[in-house]
């Protein structure tokens, strides 16, 4: 295991959390659409897109961190 310092570890944790959030939002959207409820879905494409953008931004920050030579 390589040592990246606390910032590198924090960035890895942020990627993990953002990825888990994306999976959670997608799972909730699928469950919501599979249920036979009469109300309109509350989780839409905008919510999924937001989770994707957050994950991509965190990944970009991680890559930038490594490209700057801090990792």
Image: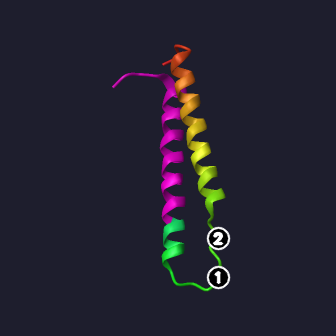
- The residue drawn where x is 49% and y is 23% is 5
Q: Residue furthest top?
A: 69
> Residue 4 appears at what percent x and percent y?
46, 22
Q: Secondary structure at mark 1?
A: loop
Q: Residue furthest left?
A: 1
Tell me the magenta residue range.
Answer: 1-27
Question: CB atoms at circles 1 and 2 under 8 Å apart?
Answer: yes
Q: Residues within 10 Å of mark 2 (few under 14, many from 20)?
A: few
> Residue 52 appears at what percent x and percent y?
57, 47
Task: Find residue 42 and name its label.
Answer: 2
Q: CA distance from mark 1 to mark 2?
A: 8 Å
Q: Secondary structure at mark 2?
A: loop
User: Considering depth in this image, is 49 or 67 the residue closer to the camera?
Assistant: 49
Quarter of the figure with the N terminus:
top left
Q: How is the image coloured?
A: rainbow
Figure check: 64 above or below 12: above
Q: Residues within 10 Å of mark 1 (few under 14, many from 20)?
A: few
User: Considering depth in this image, is 44 or 10 the residue closer to the camera?
Assistant: 44
Residue 16 in magenta stretch: yes
State whether the magenta stretch is mostly helix, strand or loop: helix
- Quarter of the figure with residue 32: bottom right
Task: Find residue 39 and name its label.
Answer: 1
User: Considering depth in this image, is 19 or 42 the residue closer to the camera?
Assistant: 42
- The residue drawn where x is 53% and y is 34% is 59
- The residue drawn where x is 48% and y is 63% is 27
């Amino acid at each position: 295991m390589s040592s990246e310092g606390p910032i590198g570890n924090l960035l890895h944790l942020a990627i993990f959390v953002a990825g888990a959030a994306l999976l959670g939002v997608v799972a909730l959207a699928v469950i919501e659409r599979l249920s036979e409820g009469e109300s309109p879905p509350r989780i839409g494409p905008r919510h999924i897109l937001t989770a994707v953008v957050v994950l991509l931004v965190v990944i970009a920050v991680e890559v930038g961190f490594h490209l700057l030579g801090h990792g």
